[in-house]
Image: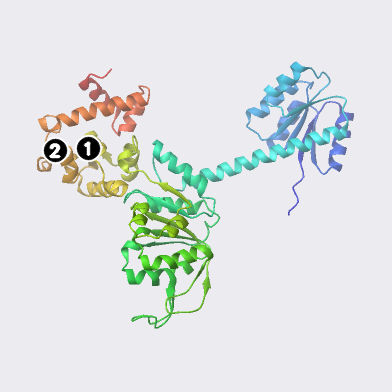
Amino acid sequence: MPERPPIKLLLVEDDEEFRTSAAECMSHQGCCVEQAANGQEALHLFDSHDFDVAVVDLSLPGISGLELLQRLKERNLETEVIILTGQATVEIAVLAMKCGAYDYIRKPCALTELALRISSAAERSRMQRENARLKLQLERQRSSIPMIGESAPLKRVFRFIERVGPTDTAVLIEGESGTGKELVARALQQLSPRSKKPFVTINSAALPDELVESELFGHVKGAFTGADSTQPGLFEVADGGTLFIDEIGELPLSLQPKLLRILEDGSFRRVGSYQERWVDVRLIAATNRKLQKEVAAGRFREDLYYRINVVSVALPPLRELEGDMPVLVRHFLEDGWEIDPDVQLVLEKYHWPGNIRQLSNVLQRAMVLADDRIVKLGDLPAELLDSCGIDAESQSEADCPVTETHVFQSLDALQRAQIESVLKRLNGNKSWAARTLGIHRRKLYRLLERYGIE
């Protein structure tokens, strides 16, 4: 185990004799010691040094010990401060603690006792620095995860990823098609100790049953017609890393015992071979089926279900992500593109059977068809317009009025409700409401006047 680095200590004391003695003693204890005779010198040293602990005399010339303590804490330093005082009253102790002091000690004091207090304070300082480092690392990792949204269901998914990602546990991801199951699997991989190792994917539903076994476990030359050479399987490719099996509910029942075995002890055989092989792989599986029903129907092994379902997460469909639509639209639209408010209302009302994947495709299509880098109703697929009672053919005319026909009466009601909801959520802040709705503030004021919204 590597030795801990020495404690970086600052002694701020105007009594030169005591300061020198304390510095000599702490140096013998293995500390790296700097000295300051007053608060101003101490602040200059903090500009160029990083200290674990500062021992500060309460009665300093110029800047007092309490004032120095407050200035240090205002800098959000992880340095722990021990106050030295010759007047150790309860009031002084409470005041020092309120200002952020780690501890206080009365003078004259034994240097051995001071050394113990410094060691304890340094341990806390290191813990705070480590916590800050881990928090920053987590924020960086989280920011690299391409998942967008602020709704409560998505926040629950984010918390699940943060807790389970750093483990080596098998995970089952459930949810409708297009909800982002592979994104969650990649996020779990990024937070895991295997993040630098391979992340390999396979979609069970995309392959014929007779090829799935070969893809997963590999085969030797001559194992079947067309096997002209020996090929490793995806488990071998993912050795040390993560294998993501999408649509695991489609896995052939005959192949499930072999998958169960490799998950239990890491052993398997290539197709056509008797040689035993071993791998170390974390499995993340996904399905849009209800596997418990598949187990009850005899189409999925119960023991395999419990083996892959150590922990599970259900991804919410897009229609349940209340308030996330404007954020998702901005994410999928290219820079410089805008969206008509009526389009936003249609997107909010549609039920999205294909979920986020379908939303992405709809907006990509709209940007291909749109003029002037503004997505309008006529750029949306007919099924979206039909769901809101809008005549899709009437939207093919570029100058078709949007709000002056009876077709849009339901849209007017939706638009008013959307504006009122956003304003309520943002406590009436019109600037933020306009941004959230994706419209200019002047446009919002016109809509407020039009609908008589206070």
Position of 343 with respect to 276 (left or right) is left
Q: Quadrant of residue 246?
A: bottom left
Question: Can residue 82 be seen from the camera position used here?
Answer: yes
The residue under the point 24% across, 43% down is: 373
List the residue tagged with mark 2: 390
Q: Quadrant of residue 341?
A: top left
Q: Are marks 2 and 1 in contact (CB under 8 Å)?
A: yes
The residue under the point 31% across, 63% down is: 206
Position of 377 with respect to 181 (left or right) is left
Q: Quadrant of residue 21?
A: top right
**Percent from the top left, x then y, of residue 219?**
42, 76
Residue 421 shows which numbered tag? none
The residue under the point 23% across, 29% down is: 415
List the residue tagged with mark 1: 346
**Percent from the top left, x then y, of residue 185?**
43, 53
Closer-to-camera residue (104/270): 270
Query: Total label count?
Result: 2
Quadrant in the picture for the N terminus: bottom right
Neighbour class for label 1 at 10 Å: few (<14), some, many (≥20)? many
Question: Can residue 405 be seen from the camera position used here?
Answer: no
Query: The disc labelled 1 sits on which kind of residue?
Result: Val
Query: The disc labelled 2 sits on which kind of residue?
Result: Ile
Tell me: residue 310, above or below residue 393. Answer: below
**Percent from the top left, x then y, of residue 197?**
52, 61
The residue under the point 78% across, 35% down is: 118
Closer-to-camera residue (246/113): 246
Kindly state the secondary structure of the residue where label 1 is placed: helix
CA–CA distance between discs 2 and 1? 10 Å
